[in-house]
Each structure stands twice: as structure tokens, then as C-alpha cells.
Image (cartoon, rainbow, N blue to C red):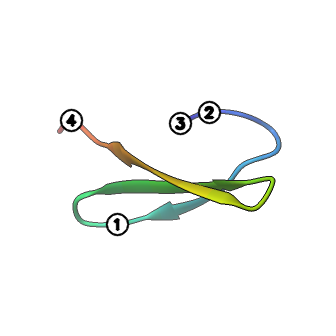
Amino acid sequence: GCGRDYTLFALIDGVVEYRNGRVHVVPVVS
């Protein structure tokens, strides 16, 4: 995902977004 408040961690299956104590997994299309 996008956002100044996000810390992004690249993973094989997607990107984990951490914000406000919540973690979201967003799929990445190659």
C-alpha cells in the first residue's frame, strides 16, 4: 500500500503494511 505513515516490508507474496498497530498484507502484481 501507500502512505507516509506506513513502514513497508517487502515479502515474496506481497507487502506487509504496518500502521497504527495494524498489519495488512497487500498482494504485489509482478
Disc 4, SS: loop
Instruction: Tell me which label, 4 or 1, sits earlier in the chain.
Output: 1
Query: Which of disc 3 and disc 1 is earlier in sequence?
Result: 3
Residue type at tag 1: Leu
Rounded to the nearest angstrom, the CA distance separating label 1 from label 3 is 13 Å
Callout 4 amino acid: Val
Q: Quadrant of residue 15?
A: bottom left
Q: Which amino acid does the dot numbered 3 rest on?
A: Gly
Q: Are the two marked residues, 4 and 3, in contact with CB atoms closer than 8 angstroms?
A: no
Residue 1 numbered mark, or none = 3
28 vs 20, left or right, is left
- Which residue is identified by label 2? 2
Q: Which mark is residue 29?
A: 4
Above or below 18: residue 11: below
Marks 2,1: beta carbons within 8 A = no
Sooner in the amino-acid sequence: mark 2 or mark 1: 2
- Looking at the rendered structure, the kind of residue marked 2 is Cys
